[in-house]
Amino acid sequence: MADVDFTVEGHVARVHLNRPQALNSITPAMDEALFAAWQEINSNPDIWVAIVSAEGEKSFCIGADVSGGTDRTGRMALGGGLTGIAGPLVKVKKPMIAAVQGFAVGGGFEIAMCCDIIVAAETAQFGLPETKVGIIGECGVVHRAIRQLPYHIAMAAIMTGERIKAEQAHTYGLVNEVVSYSDLSAAADRWAAKICAAAPGAVQAAKDAAISRLDMPLEVALMTRFEPIEAYHGTADQREGLAAASEKRKPVWTGR
């Protein structure tokens, strides 16, 4: 099997890190495979949601593989540019779900935070080990953590390198749901089904609107015109939603 497995089942894309012997640390070849996966997810209209998961109970991902040293050639934008480290930031337009178990540290923590929903096994631990081991760079994980966690919790994790356990992460609002490891895959599938039950075009337009103005004042966001929202108006799915509501039935989305 490849170190990154990419499959599509129905409207759900699955991006699965498959290097458990190295705690799913990301090599340059895996980085390229991830970049290709993000591109396919963005461009394929039949993909409505993506689940990012990993093999092995011990680790979701510990970031870049530094077994050969930290010097790199080529892009090596960890996560195929998803996180924007050392390369162009790739914005995935479709909803993303992270199914996290074991260690999600460094770049692995950042990949989880890049997702819109995080389902965590009880074994999950999130952390930023950089300062603890004397390594710090232009790490996006710091910038995301300070935005997605309460200030003092984020700063404690950044400055001490101590990990945040799954239940704590749930308390802080970082994680949507905590389940047993045996139920992790099924829980991610349940979230994917919930998202697929909504109109894909509306979901994608809503994600774009929410994220693209996240760091702007409310007044600016309220006055902004969002092209994806405008493009969704008048589509077959919008008409189907109105018809289904009128006819008191479940809508049948096409995503076109």
Image (cartoon, helix red, strand yellow):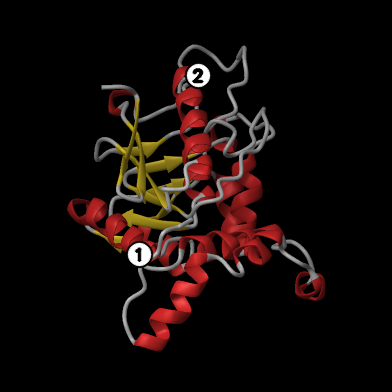
Q: Looking at the image, which is closer to me, 206 or 16?
A: 206
Q: Is residue 177 at all visible to an observer of this figure?
A: yes
Q: Position of residue 113 (x, y in %)?
A: 52, 50
Q: Which mark is residue 22?
A: none
Residue 110 drawn above or below residue 252: above
Q: Looking at the image, which is closer to me, 130 or 48?
A: 48
Position of 49 with respect to 86 (left or right) is left
Position of 203 with respect to 198 (left or right) is right
Q: Which residue is mark 1?
A: 177
Q: Position of residue 202 (x, y in %)?
A: 53, 66
Q: Which residue is mark 2?
A: 28
Question: Quick one: quadrant of the N terminus?
Answer: top left
Residue 212 drawn above or below residue 194: above
Position of 184 with respect to 242 (left or right) is left
In the image, what residue occupies the spot 20% across and 56% down?
Answer: 183
Instruction: Name the amino acid type tagged 2.
Output: Pro
Q: Position of residue 243 (x, y in %)?
A: 43, 80
Instruction: Name the amino acid type tagged 1.
Output: Glu
Residue 117 drawn above or below residue 129: below
Q: Looking at the image, which is closer to me, 203 or 114?
A: 203
